[in-house]
Image (tube, rainbow, N blue to C red):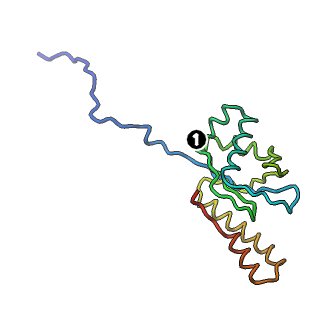
Amino acid sequence: MKRPLVWQPTIWRCQIDFTAMVRIKNRYIAVQIVPHTPTQSLRLNDHSLAKILLQNVEKYHGVYGLAVIEQGFRVKYINDRTKMAIIRCLHRGQHFVSSILPLITLIGDVRAKFRTLYIGATIIQCNKFIVKHQKQFLDRAMGQITSAKERQDLFKSVMEFDMDR
């Protein structure tokens, strides 16, 4: 005599943590800060620029926009000489950051605007773009300088690329 088939719940032998398998996607935004008068120095550091950007995201997108970008947001690089910066944010918050950049008109007490140059998925591609852009800046600036010492100082200050922040 055959036994009737009885349903038995299956027991999982291994448990997999699926939350650990999700990749965090970052976006890197390369921007140039253009002061209203070209002779003005911005004297910005990464913390003050991050604070300005977060305040403007909260102003235009509210608390929800601030909460979306706050987790992975960081200013990775800023150069006062070339007025270039790299901003890192999470993929889901990239739209909030890139949409407020044209709306910012005051950085500290200086009238200025942001010009978005490049948006990339990896810091390596963003670095390549920044180096290429800074070499073009050096080509334009070197033609106006006659002293070899001034050229060397300009080269060091423009091509410094400290990403240890």
Image location of residue 128, percent across then percent down: 64, 65
The residue lying at 71 percent from left, 32 percent from top is: 62
73 and 99: which is toward the camera: 73
| Quarter of the C terminus within the rendering | bottom right
| Quarter of the N terminus within the rendering | top left
> Would you place residue 51 above or below residue 135 in this image?
above
102 and 125: which is toward the camera: 102
How many numbered marks, from 0 up? 1
Judge left or right: residue 34 versus residue 120.
Answer: right
Q: Which residue is mark 1?
A: 71
Image location of residue 124, percent across then percent down: 59, 61
Residue 63: quadrant of the picture: top right
Judge left or right: residue 33 versus residue 5.
Answer: right
> Would you place residue 23 above or below residue 158 in this image?
above
31 and 151: which is toward the camera: 151
The residue lying at 78 percent from left, 56 percent from top is: 33
Determine whether the residue tagged by mark 1 lies in a helix, strand or loop.
Answer: loop
The residue lying at 76 percent from left, 84 percent from top is: 148
Image location of residue 27, percent across then percent down: 62, 49
> Would you place residue 131 above or below residue 34 in this image?
below
Image location of residue 146, percent across then percent down: 82, 82
> Would you place residue 160 above or below residue 34 in this image?
below
Judge left or right: residue 9 versus residue 4.
Answer: right
The residue lying at 62 percent from left, 49 percent from top is: 74
Residue 149: quadrant of the picture: bottom right
In this view, which residue lies farthest toward the right? 37
Kind of residue indicated by mark 1: Gln
Q: Residues within 10 Å of mark 1 (few under 14, many from 20)?
A: few
